[in-house]
Structures are given as C-alpha cells and as structure tokens.
Image: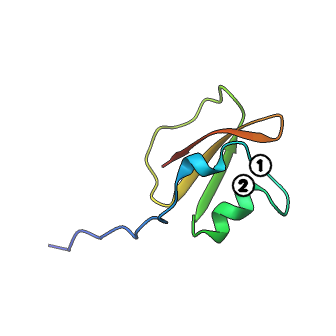
Amino acid sequence: MAPVPTPPAQPDDAPESYVGLPAEGAEGAEQLARERGWTTVRSLPPGAIITMEYLVGRLNFEVEGGTVVRCWIG
C-alpha cells in the first residue's frame, strides 16, 4: 500500500493582517501573501459563491472597493 502523502506546511501568517490592505498593487495584499509563501491567492467579491473544498496553501480574500475586508485560509 502506498504511503499517505504529507501536505506541505502553510506559511506561519495571520490572515487578519491582510484586512484593510489594498488587494492589488506594489503594496497590495495579493503580492504580500505570495512573498510570505502562499501558493494560491484568491480574491473574491462579497457574497461570491465558491466551492468549500480545503486547499493547503491557499489564502482567500474578500475584496470590496479594492480593499480586503475579510481573509481566511483554505
């Protein structure tokens, strides 16, 4: 039987630190998240319908008016 793969560790990062930042640009949350080691960064409008599967290394942003208003892992 094949061994169960061990998922890579996620960045040691606080999702709350992105709230209030602009989503895009040189000082934006998306670029900062990638620099901190997140492999997938997803920006979503408020109320977006999304799948609920958990993806290791993914950081989700809810963006309203160009600003991150909520952030969560997975």
Q: Is residue 16 above or below residue 29?
A: above
Residue 72's spot in the image, x, y percent? 53, 44
Q: Position of residue 50 (x, y in %)?
A: 57, 35
Q: Is residue 12 left or right of residue 62?
A: left
Q: Gap between marks 1 and 2, in whole Å?
A: 5 Å
Residue that badge 2 annotates = 29
Residue pictured at 77% horizontal, 49% vertical: 23
Quarter of the image that includes the N terminus = bottom left
Q: Is residue 21 above or below residue 32?
A: above
Q: Quadrant of residue 62?
A: top right
Q: Quadrant of residue 61?
A: top right
Mark 2: amino acid: Ala
Callout 1: helix, strand or loop?
loop
Please name the amino acid that badge 1 sits on: Ala
Residue 2 picture location, percent across and down: 20, 74
Give yes or no for contact between labels 1 and 2 (Cβ–Cβ under 8 Å).
yes
Which residue occupies the extreme top position in the image? 47
In the rendered view, does 66 fall on the left or right side of 17? right
Q: Position of residue 43 (x, y in %)?
A: 69, 45
Numbered disc 2: secondary structure: helix
Q: Which residue is mark 1?
A: 23
Whether residue 11 sits left or right of residue 22 in the image: it is: left
Residue at left 23%, top 68%? 4
Q: How many numbered discs?
A: 2
Q: Name, please, the residue furthest toward the bottom.
A: 2
Pointer 1 or 2: first along the chain: 1
- What residue do we see at 57% from left, 46% from top? 16
- Residue in the foreground of this view, choosing between 41 and 67: 67
